[in-house]
Image (cartoon, grey):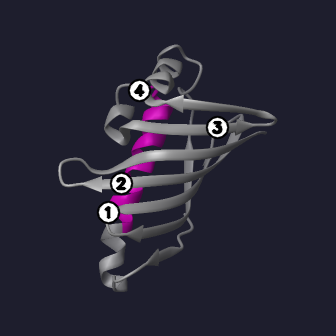
């Protein structure tokens, strides 16, 4: 995994645990996708999260319930997913992560926004995705 970490006000020693906690929802997302576990997405995504997915010349906007329904119906998920985190930026209780997810048939380039709360920790608030068929 390749990491570039941009932080404000954190020493390098403090950055590693922060980086792990920020990127944990992305790993949980990949794990849930691989398992086809639509319910697990509820713990990863903020309830009001949106995904904007661009595949070729088509764009889809997905709210969490629609994304979960696609997974339940087998339209997405259920195949191996590898995740590479390219960059992490943290500013207080918001973060952005760029990542690349690979499945057997697609490469997904993700720009992920996350929010942190005392109750739920880090959760994905929104994702812009460029999906490229292999």
Residue for point 34% across, 83% down: 9
Disc 2 versus disc 1: distance between alpha carbons? 6 Å
Q: Position of residue 49 (x, y in %)?
A: 43, 39
Tag 2 near tag 1, CB within 8 Å:
yes
Q: Earlier in the sequence, mark 2 or mark 1?
A: 1
Report helix, strand or loop for mark 2: strand
Judged by its main secondary structure, the magenta piece is helix
Residue for point 41% across, 25% down: 38
Q: Earlier in the sequence, mark 4 or mark 2?
A: 4
Quickly name the residue at label 3: 53
Can residue 47 be seen in the rendering of this structure? yes
How crowded pointer 1 is (Cα within 10 Å; few <14, some 14-19, many 20+) is rated as few
Q: Earlier in the sequence, mark 1 or mark 4?
A: 4
Disc 3 versus disc 4: distance between alpha carbons? 20 Å
Q: Earlier in the sequence, mark 3 or mark 4?
A: 4
How crowded pointer 4 is (Cα within 10 Å; few <14, some 14-19, many 20+) is rated as some
Write down the quadrant of residue 75 in the picture.
top right
Which stretch did the figure color magenta? Answer: 19-38
Residue 75 falls left or right of residue 118? right
Q: Position of residue 2 (x, y in %)?
A: 57, 68
Q: Nearer the viewer, residue 42 or 91?
A: 91
Quickly name the residue at label 1: 93
Q: Earlier in the sequence, mark 3 or mark 1?
A: 3
Quickly name the residue at label 4: 37
Tag 3 near tag 4, CB within 8 Å:
no
Report helix, strand or loop for mark 4: loop
């Amino acid at each position: 995994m390749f990491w570039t970490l941009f932080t404000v006000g954190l020493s390098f020693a403090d950055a590693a645990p922060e980086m792990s906690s920020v990127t944990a929802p992305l790993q949980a997302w990949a794990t849930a996708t691989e398992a086809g576990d639509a319910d697990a997405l509820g713990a990863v995504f903020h309830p009001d999260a949106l995904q904007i997915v661009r595949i070729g010349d088509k764009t889809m906007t997905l709210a969490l319930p629609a994304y979960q329904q696609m997974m339940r119906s087998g339209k997405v998920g259920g195949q191996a997913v590898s995740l590479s985190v390219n960059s992490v930026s943290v500013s207080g209780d918001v973060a952005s992560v760029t990542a690349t997810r690979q499945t057997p048939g697609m490469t997904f380039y993700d720009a992920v926004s996350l929010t942190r709360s005392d109750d739920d920790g880090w959760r994905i608030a929104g994702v812009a995705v460029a999906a490229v068929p292999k």
